């Protein structure tokens, strides 16, 4: 019996060294595939975006066919379809290829250069390892016309700047009904402050139009803005303007006043320099508390809770006592403006506000 027990023990063999090595190698490979590449410690972390070293532009008889951009480090692309654009827009097919430090852009069959062009690559390129984004990069032709049209895009409801909206210039010869069926003469985007700029604009009469996502397709759920006049661009001109964007879907939506039967001795007295077709709106924590149509140059808002309020107002052009939205290329929206200070309401106190309407 003892002999049999010894034989059984001999059958339990230890794992072979080669098998252990194989298991270890498989584990290392698997963990390496799952891990992020971390630079060795001890050196400073690279926080700088790639820098453009050189560019090579292939043009044949006013036909732009290829652009090569060489950077100082390996790169990758960052949201190409959202960030890259060319002005004037073109129906040519645009392809791109990244090979280490070089970005190549192909135009098929070609981009016709009629007078000037701009390739916008802001926020398109980032470094391969750390992902630092190059936030400003443009490739432009030589200046032909020394004309600039600059402006600011803001939301009509709260006067907040709108970023990354398409801003377009259309020639006067384009009928309004065809404006989304034709490519604009120029296109650009608004920055984080809502500012946009067209440089080197050919002399002529232009209509200014803004759209949120796709400049040649209008969705009623998007913010849109348009000029109700033509901008005359001529030699060495500089035009500074603004656009108020609205959302057509909100045409049927006006903030409802909170129904509150509270009776207090707290009030706001608004002193005005104008009283014609004016409507005041009082907000608390972004909720509409009161809406008052102005009858004379002193408007009293009663029965308020203690707290901090903001005041907005608009000229009621159609006298319907509510904010009226715009209608694309037909009617501008009523402009809603804000009193530039918060209003602190105290218990058993009348707070006076002087509101100057331009």
Image (cartoon, helix red, strand yellow):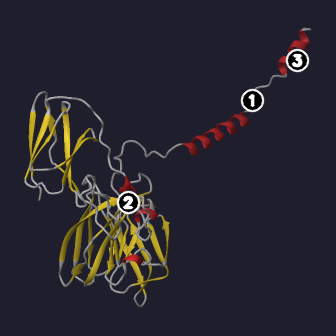
Measure the C-alpha gap from mark 3 to mark 1. Answer: 18 Å
Q: Is residue 146 left or right of residue 91?
A: left
Query: Residue 326 falls in which quadrant of the image?
Result: bottom left
- Give the farthest residue toward the bottom: 61
Q: Which residue is mark 1?
A: 15
Q: Which residue is mark 2?
A: 248
> Which percent across, then down, holds residue 254?
33, 50
Q: Earlier in the sequence, mark 2 or mark 3?
A: 3
Question: Can you say whether 156 is above or below 215 in the image?
Answer: above
Q: Is residue 74 above or below residue 143?
A: above
Which quarter of the picture shows residue 17? top right
Q: Residues within 10 Å of mark 2 (few under 14, many from 20)?
A: some
Mark 3 or mark 1: whose residue is earlier in sequence: 3
Most extreme residue toward the top, as rendered? 1
Is 35 or 198 nearer to us in this picture?
A: 198
Secondary structure state at the residue bearing disc 3: helix
- Residue name at image x 46 percent, y 72 percent: 104
User: Which quarter shows the N terminus?
Assistant: top right
- Numbered disc 1: secondary structure: loop
- Residue 88 pos. (x, y %): 37, 78
The residue located at (38%, 60%) in the rendering is: 248
Q: Which residue is mark 3?
A: 7
């Amino acid at each position: 019996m003892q002999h049999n027990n010894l034989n059984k023990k001999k059958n339990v063999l230890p794992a072979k060294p080669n098998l252990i090595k194989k298991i270890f190698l498989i584990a290392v490979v698997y963990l390496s595939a799952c891990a992020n590449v971390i630079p060795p410690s001890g050196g400073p972390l690279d926080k700088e975006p790639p820098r453009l070293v050189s560019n090579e532009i292939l043009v044949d008889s006013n036909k732009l066919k290829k652009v090569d951009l060489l950077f100082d480090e390996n790169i990758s692309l960052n949201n190409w379809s959202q960030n890259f654009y060319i002005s004037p827009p073109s129906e040519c097919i645009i392809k791109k290829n990244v090979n280490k430090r070089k970005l190549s852009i192909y135009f098929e069959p070609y981009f016709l250069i009629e007078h000037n062009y701009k390739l916008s690559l802001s926020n398109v390129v980032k470094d391969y390892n750390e992902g630092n984004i190059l936030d400003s990069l443009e490739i432009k032709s030589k200046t032909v016309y020394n004309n600039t049209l600059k402006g600011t895009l803001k939301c009509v409801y709260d006067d907040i700047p709108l970023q990354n909206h398409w801003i377009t210039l259309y020639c006067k010869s384009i009928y309004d009904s065809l404006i989304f069926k034709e490519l604009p003469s120029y296109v650009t985007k608004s920055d984080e402050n809502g500012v946009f700029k067209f440089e080197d604009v050919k002399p002529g009469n232009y209509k200014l139009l803004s759209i949120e996502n796709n400049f040649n397709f209008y969705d009623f759920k998007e913010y849109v803005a348009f000029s109700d006049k033509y901008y005359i661009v001529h030699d060495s001109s500089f035009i500074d303007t603004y656009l108020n964007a609205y959302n057509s879907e909100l045409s049927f939506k006006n903030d409802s006043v909170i129904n509150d039967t509270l009776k207090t001795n707290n009030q706001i007295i608004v002193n005005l320099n104008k009283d014609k077709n004016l409507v005041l709106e009082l907000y608390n924590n972004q909720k509409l508390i009161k809406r008052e149509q102005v009858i004379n140059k002193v408007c009293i808002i009663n029965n308020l809770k203690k707290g901090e309020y903001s005041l907005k107002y608009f000229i009621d052009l159609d006298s319907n006592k509510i904010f009226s939205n715009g209608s694309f290329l037909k009617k501008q929206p009523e402009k809603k403006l804000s009193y530039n200070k918060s209003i602190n309401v105290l218990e058993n106190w009348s707070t006076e506000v002087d509101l100057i309407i331009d």
